[in-house]
C-alpha cells in the first residue's frame, strides 16, 4: 500500500482543509475510542482515504452528494478496486448522516472496526 509522492502531498493538504462532516467524525475518533487507532486523510497508493483503521484494515469514506454523479462514481469504483486489492475493506457513510448524528456514526465506525480486528487471544 505504498503511497505516491502526490498522494502524500494531497493527504497533508487535506488534513488542513477537512470538510465539516470529516472534522466532526475526526473529533470523535482522534482519541482512539475502545483502543482503536484511526488515521485521517491517509494516503493509499495514488489515492487518499478520509480515514483508515490499520488494525481492522478498513477505510472509512464520508461521501457527500457528488459521489452519486457519474464522473465521481467512476473514480470511486477505480479507487475502490485498487484499495480492496490490498485486502482493505471500504465503509462508506453519507455526509448527511454524519451531520444529522455524528456520535451514532462514530459509534458504528468503532463497532465495525472492533469486529474486524484480529483476535489478540492466543491459545
Image: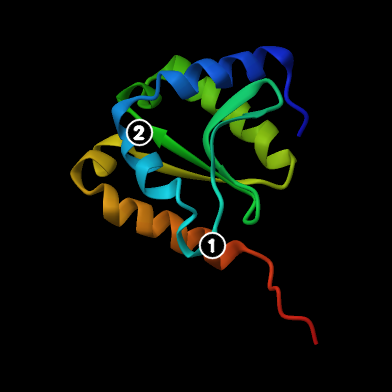
Task: Give the side of residue 34 with respect to residue 87, left or right.
Answer: left
Q: Tell me what residue is drawn at x 36 percent, y 26 percent.
A: 68
Specify the quadrant that holds the N terminus: top right
Q: Position of residue 10 (x, y in %)?
A: 57, 15
Foreground pick, 8 / 69 = 8
Instruction: Assign a secondary structure to mark 1.
Output: helix
Foreground pick, 51 / 81 = 51
Task: Give the side of residue 88 with respect to residue 107, left or right.
Answer: right
Q: Position of residue 75 (x, y in %)?
A: 54, 20
Q: Position of residue 61 (x, y in %)?
A: 46, 37
Q: Which residue is mark 1?
A: 35
* Relative to 44, residue 115 above or below: below
Q: Which residue is mark 2?
A: 23
Whole-number angstrom distance, CA of label 1 to CA of label 2? 20 Å
Callout 1 environment at 10 Å: few (<14), some (14 to 19), or many (20+)?
few
Which tag, 1 or 2, sits closer to the chain's start?
2
Q: Position of residue 114 (x, y in %)?
A: 54, 65
Q: Residue furthest left?
A: 100
* Relative to 56, residue 123 above or below: below
* Relative to 5, residue 55 above or below: below
Task: Give the side of residue 78 with respect to residue 86, left or right.
Answer: left
Instruction: Assign a secondary structure to mark 2.
Output: helix
Specify the quadrant that holds the C terminus: bottom right
Amino acid at each position: 500500500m505504498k503511497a505516491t509522492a502526490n498522494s502524500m502531498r494531497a493527504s497533508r493538504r487535506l488534513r488542513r482543509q477537512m470538510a465539516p462532516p470529516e472534522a466532526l467524525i475526526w473529533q470523535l475518533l482522534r482519541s482512539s475510542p475502545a483502543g482503536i487507532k484511526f488515521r485521517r486523510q491517509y494516503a493509499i497508493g495514488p489515492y487518499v482515504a478520509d480515514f483508515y483503521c490499520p488494525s481492522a484494515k478498513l477505510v472509512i469514506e464520508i461521501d457527500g452528494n457528488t459521489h452519486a454523479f457519474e464522473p465521481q462514481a467512476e473514480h470511486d469504483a477505480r479507487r475502490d478496486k485498487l484499495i480492496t486489492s490490498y485486502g482493505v475493506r471500504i465503509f462508506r457513510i453519507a455526509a448527511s448522516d454524519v451531520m444529522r448524528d455524528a456520535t451514532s456514526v462514530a459509534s458504528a465506525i468503532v463497532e465495525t472496526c472492533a469486529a474486524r480486528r484480529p483476535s489478540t487471544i492466543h491459545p
